[in-house]
């Protein structure tokens, strides 16, 4: 609760008794209780409104999977390397159509060979 431990809470209560006085303290405590009750009702209403607008799939969502503390780059890389990316290429080659196989593989660009001693082209506007 706001990072306050028991001894700090007792010190705050003593300070409240001294500042507010014993005659006004029950009135302020009642106001605080009403405020907390209103905040709880507002939170419950917002939760119900969200459920009505988004639907019940928001209730079934596993929020722990979206926690950034669960992020493990080693696991993500391992899963990415274990994926079978070659299956569409093999299926296209097995179908025997060159057009489908060509779509599955990226097209290779031809590489221009420069004559010895010719400098590489330079575009001053590209920098």
Image (cartoon, helix red, strand yellow):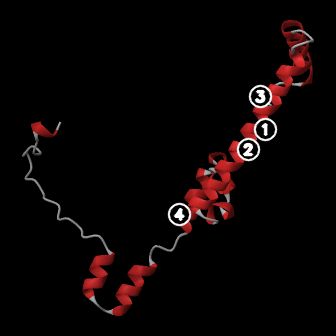
Q: Which residue is mark 4?
A: 80
Rendered residue at 69%/54% (across/down): 64
Number of other residues with Cα within 10 Å of mark 4, as a class: few under 14, some 14 to 19, many 20 or more: few
Q: Which mark is residue 104?
A: none
Q: Are marks 3 and 2 in contact (CB under 8 Å)?
A: no
Q: Which residue is mark 2?
A: 41
Number of other residues with Cα within 10 Å of mark 2, as a class: few under 14, some 14 to 19, many 20 or more: few
As helix, strand or loop, the secondary structure at mark 2 comes to helix
As helix, strand or loop, the secondary structure at mark 3 comes to loop
Rendered residue at 62%/50% (across/down): 71
Quarter-wise, where is residue 15 in the image?
top right
Comes first in the chain, label 3 or label 2: 3
Quarter-wise, where is residue 52 in the image?
bottom right
Q: Which mark is residue 37?
A: 1
Image coords of residue 23 (percent x, y): 91, 12
Q: Nearer the viewer, mark 3 or mark 1?
A: 1
Instruction: Give the left or right position of residue 82, taking residue 92 as reference.
Output: right
Image coords of residue 53 (percent x, y): 57, 59
**Distance of mark 2 from mark 4, alpha carbons?**
45 Å
**Distance of mark 4 from mark 1, alpha carbons?**
49 Å
The residue nearer to you, when weighing 71 against 101, is 71
Instruction: Give the left or right position of residue 119, taking residue 6 as reference.
Output: left
As helix, strand or loop, the secondary structure at mark 4 comes to helix
**Distance of mark 3 from mark 2, alpha carbons?**
20 Å
The residue nearer to you, when weighing 65 against 55, is 55
Rendered residue at 12%/45% (across/down): 120
The residue nearer to you, when weighing 84 against 26, is 26
**Distance of mark 3 from mark 1, alpha carbons?**
18 Å
Q: Which mark is residue 2?
A: 3
Comes first in the chain, label 4 or label 1: 1
Comes first in the chain, label 4 or label 3: 3
């Amino acid at each position: 609760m706001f990072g306050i431990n028991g001894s700090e809470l007792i010190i705050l209560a003593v300070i409240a008794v001294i500042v507010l006085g014993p005659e006004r303290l029950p009135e302020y405590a009642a106001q605080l209780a009403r405020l907390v009750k209103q905040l709880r009702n507002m939170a419950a209403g917002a939760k119900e409104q969200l459920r009505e607008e988004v639907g019940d799939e928001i209730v079934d969502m596993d929020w722990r999977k979206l926690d950034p503390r669960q992020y493990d780059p080693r696991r993500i890389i391992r899963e990415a390397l274990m994926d079978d990316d070659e299956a569409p290429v093999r299926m296209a080659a097995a179908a025997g159509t060159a057009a489908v196989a060509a779509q599955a593989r990226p097209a290779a660009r031809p590489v221009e060979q420069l004559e010895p001693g010719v400098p590489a082209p330079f575009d001053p506007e590209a920098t």
